[in-house]
Image: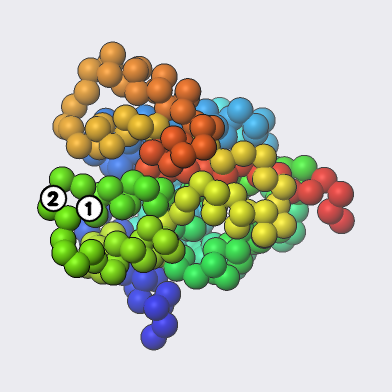
Amino acid sequence: MTHQDAIDARIQSYYAEVFDEHARLTTRSPQGPVEFLRTQEIVRARLAPGRVVDIGGGSGIHARALQRDGFDVQLIDPVPRHVEQARSDGLHAQVADARALPFPDAVFDGALLLGPLYHLSSRDDRLQALREAARVVAPGGFVFAAGLSRYIAFGMASLGRPVPEPYPAEWTALTAHGTPPAGLRFPAGHFHTAEELGEEVSAAGLRLLEVVGVEGPAGALLESVESASAELIEASLTVARAAASVPGIRDMSAHLIAVAQVDARRV
């Protein structure tokens, strides 16, 4: 079994038995709704209603919102539980892998790739997922590719506790290479910097437009509290929007999104 095979197996058990992905963007913490609203803003700023594929779309939170507003959405996810949840709410969904999409070339106006990249440990696999997203999107269409911030991952691993001596090798590996620390319950494959995410998108043949932070610097606070006032949520959104494109500061968002376009000259 390869390292990625082990991660893939953990993905199945984690999302089927341990973690409720449906609740993550809705009720799990105040951070979820902020992530949802900001992601929808980023997508809709570029994408008009049309055909969209939601790759690794989970139970369909984003797909459902788009479908309500006139988008024709197809969802794929590797976890059968997620696909069943999406279908139960009227979405077109099927079990599939981001690295081998079951669609012809150039049939969508846009692709959401909001989950797969941070579950893939190797650069080759991440580039393959990005190329597959680009393949099924028509020339001039958009791809929205998310990564998990390496900065936030390091903070979660290291802050609020004494610094060990000697300095842990896995902390160095995380900061230098995005390698997840051992023992994580979450089946992480890789943590990105904004610059690395943009470089991978470009290397996959897409035209990079921008890399933005999603939740902003207040996202970690919202993730750590059970409830938040409307004023705190609105303040967090204001800061997230202001910080979205600032180099370095954008990495203080837990999620980063690369916005890219398929070459309009592609035949």
Secondary structure at numbered mark 2: loop
- Residue 21 lies left or right of residue 77; in this view the side is left
Residue 158's label in the rendered image is 1
Q: Which residue ends up furthest to the front in the rendered image?
A: 166
Q: Residue at x 12, y 52 (%)?
A: 162
Residue 247, percent from left and from top: 51, 37
Residue flagged by tag 1: what amino acid is it? Ser
Of residues 264 and 64, the one drawn nearer to the viewer in this rendering: 264
Q: Few, some or many C-alpha atoms within 10 Å of disc 2 (few <14, some 14-19, many ≥20)?
A: few
Q: Residue at x 70, y 52 (%)?
A: 206
Residue 145, percent from left and from top: 55, 48
Give the position of the C terminus as an image quadrant: bottom right
Q: Quadrant of residue 169?
A: bottom left
> Looking at the image, is 136 positioned above or below residue 108?
below
Q: Which residue ends up furthest to the left in the rendered image?
A: 162
- Residue 16 lies left or right of residue 161; in this view the side is right
Mark 1 touches mark 2? (CB < 8 Å): yes
Label 2: which residue? Answer: 161
- Residue 51 lies left or right of residue 124; in this view the side is right
Q: Residue at x 29, y 67 (%)?
A: 170
Give the Cα distance between marks 1 and 2: 7 Å
Residue 189, percent from left and from top: 40, 64
Q: Quadrant of residue 34?
A: top left
